[in-house]
Amino acid sequence: MALVDVADLAIEFPLYHHNARSLKQRILASSPLRLKKDEDNRIVVAALRDLTFRIGNGERVALVGPNGAGKTTLLRTIAGVYEPVAGTLRVEGEIGSLIDPAAGMDPLLTGRENVVLRALYRGLTEADGRALADEVAGFAGLGEFFEVPIRGYSAGMSVRLSFAMATAMTPAILLMDEWFLAGDSDFMKKAETRLSKLVTDAEILIIATHDMTIVRKWCTRAIRLEGGRILADGTVDEVLGAETVT
Amino acid sequence: MHHAANPVREFDAAAPRRRERAREDLEGGFARWRLAWALARGDITHRYRGSVLGPFWLTISTGVMLTALGVLYAKLFKMDVASYLPWLSVSLIVWAVISQVVTDATTSLTGAEGVIRQMPLPYTVHALRVVFRNAVVAAHNLPLIFVVFAVFGVTPSWTVVLAIPGLLLLGIAGFAASIFLGMICARFRDIPPIVGSIMQIAFFVSPVIWKPEMVGHWEPYLPINPFFALMETVRGPLMGTTGGIVVWLTAILWTGLLTLLAWTFFARFRGRIAFWV
């Protein structure tokens, strides 16, 4: 059973490598909306504030909201990259993250070698990685390019490889940023089949996107973030309004 | 497709359980030694991509430097090349290992920024990567010592085996340094150049190109310098002495202190690393 349970969660980014004094004067005087001083007198950006939600099995959740709303930060926090300064976080189930397709990839290694490297990142052995590589090769459909260093890949090819890699491991919880839309239409059809399969296996999908067509097609629930807070949380129609799909 | 077990991850900002998390990080990092090794190997092969001799350029450049310096210093200091050059070779090669580890340690975390901000991974993997990378480099340079020995007809004594625990100690110290320096250098960006200057000064104030007995009655106090203590546990055995009990004890003491410092710092500030890099 996969679960993401978040209560009163807050994330603050300290602005370390800037001229703190001038920054303080410039910003705190004008609009202390998201930039504030913490107890150590540092300037911090309140990236996420007072988030409380619970995502259970089988839910496909869209995170929507303007740029800088905190969507990607929330994905990374759920993935375990950032430690919250307040609140609690409970995640049950293995996480597959498609937040940055290039993370952990070595541009000088071939597609196959990168799959093995990714397996090592996940704590598997080289033998597991080689088995995984054969599986990824089949789904990514890169043909002979699978044996070529990935710095020669087009954006779409990189996406195919990352998508195949992240979903080949059957994560219980799939975290996704919207970059994966860069695949061509053939691949998107395949990707959709695979995604539906993942979700019907009663896992969780959390996707940050600006594309409402995607939200209406794939998601069962939407959370609207703005300024690091939750503005609305409910079914897709409740949050986006009952528009017709164009 | 294989289903993994269902891991549970909990975090409560009111009760961060920092020590426990630091220990899990350490265990997780060592469990992923294969990853650290693959990354370290990649660092070396990428550096010499497309080159015919590859990492053996490390060996060649060290060899050329030793020949040039040996001839020059013997002339300058009016020493006998046959007795001085083997000693200088061992000194310079061991010093190069120490100095490179310290320099690499300053970027152990900032150099992995892309990964740290994108995926959860034990931070100790990055420290392990630094140690492995330097071990590979050392493995290309240390054999030169025996070439020099062969040229000058020096027969290594049984004490050579003591260099192995000496190198292990160096590895532990390097790991602790990679965590400690990696963290403070991520937080305070002025530290790496300071470390660079310190290493330059340390090269001259430590007995690397001059012999310990040259300082006369100060010689017993030399192990106060941690660089000397750690270097001597490798150099002494290679040169046919045990290094002496005092050197070994101080080297172990310095490594222990560094490890304690690194652990304390790591346990306290581990959760901030993702915000620092």
Image (cartoon, grey):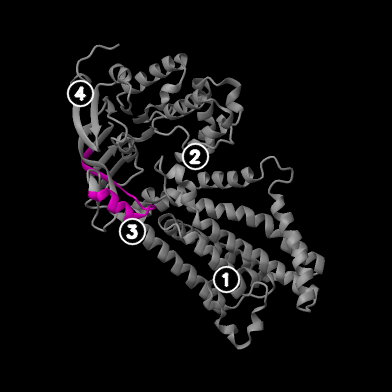
| Label 2, label 1: how far apart the Cα atoms are | 38 Å
Question: Which chain does tag 4 point to?
Answer: A
Where disc 1 sits, the SS reads helix
Please provide percent x and percent y for residue A43: 29, 52
| Label 2, label 3: how far apart the Cα atoms are | 28 Å
Where disc 4 sits, the SS reads helix
Return the residue at label 1: B202
Comparing B199 with B9, the one in front is B199
Where disc 3 sits, the SS reads helix
Q: Quadrant of the N terminus of chain A?
A: top left
- As drawn, B86 above or below A125: below
| Label 3, label 1: how far apart the Cα atoms are | 30 Å
Amino acid type indicated by mark 4: Val
Q: Is residue A128 left or right of residue B267?
A: right
Which region of the structure is painted magenta?
A6-29
Judged by depth in the image, the label closer to the viewer, 2 or 1, is 1
Return the residue at label 2: A120
Return the residue at label 4: A239
Question: Which chain does tag 2 point to?
Answer: A
| Label 4, label 2: how far apart the Cα atoms are | 40 Å
Amino acid type indicated by mark 1: Ala
Comparing A210 with B37, the one in front is A210
Return the residue at label 3: B268
- As drawn, A26 above or below B204: above
Q: Quadrant of the C terminus of chain A?
A: top left
| Label 1, label 4: how far apart the Cα atoms are | 64 Å
